[in-house]
Amino acid sequence: MDRILIASFIIGIIAISGCVQQQTGQTKAEDTVKEQATELCIAACQSAKESGVPLDNGPCLSEEIVEDWVCDIAHNPRQPIDNEPQNQCSSYRAGKTHHFVELDTDCKLIRAI
């Protein structure tokens, strides 16, 4: 009886975890790329700050920080300067890349999509 209860519990946990993963719509590989893009973007931002690169105008730091991801700086909350094309990653605007990591001027994550 105890073995049946334990086996049922384990099967239930496996079933629930499979349902949760399907609902997120992202695979572990996609999550890993997103995390890698975020980490590299933060490192690029910190390096730019240390080198004296002005971040107040919300520049694009990398047109492809990893494959299909750009690294962009914006204000949090957004300001009109963030919407100016010269302050956005052109590869994203042109549809060459499809994802972006957006950091604030202190290199803190705003969003990664």
Image: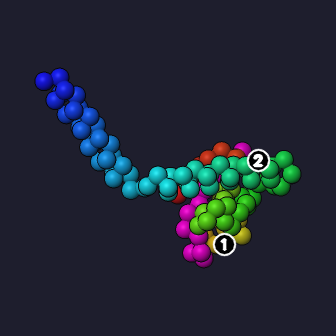
> Is 52 placed above or below 3 here?
below
Task: Kindly check if marks 1 and 2 are in contact, taking CB atoms under 8 A apart as contact.
Answer: no
Residue 59 quadrant: bottom right
Along the viewing direction, whichever of 89 and 5 lies nearer the viewer: 5
Left or right: 93 in relation to 86: left
Report which residue position mark 2 lands on. Answer: 46
Range of the magenta residues?
A: 93-106
- Identify which residue is drawn at 54% across, 52% down: 32
User: What secondary structure is marked by label 1?
Assistant: helix
- Identify which residue is drawn at 50% across, 57% down: 30
What amino acid is found at the position of numbered circle 1 in the picture?
Ser
- Identify which residue is drawn at 83% across, 55% down: 53
Report which residue position mark 1 lands on. Answer: 90
Along the viewing direction, whichever of 33 and 10 lies nearer the viewer: 10
State the image coordinates of residue 40 (x, y, percent, origin top left). Answer: 68, 52
Residue, far left:
1
Q: CA distance from mark 1 to mark 2?
A: 22 Å
State the image coordinates of residue 35 (x, y, percent, origin top left). Answer: 58, 50
- Identify which residue is drawn at 24% across, 38% down: 11
Left or right: 40 in relation to 5: right
Q: Is residue 10 magenta?
A: no
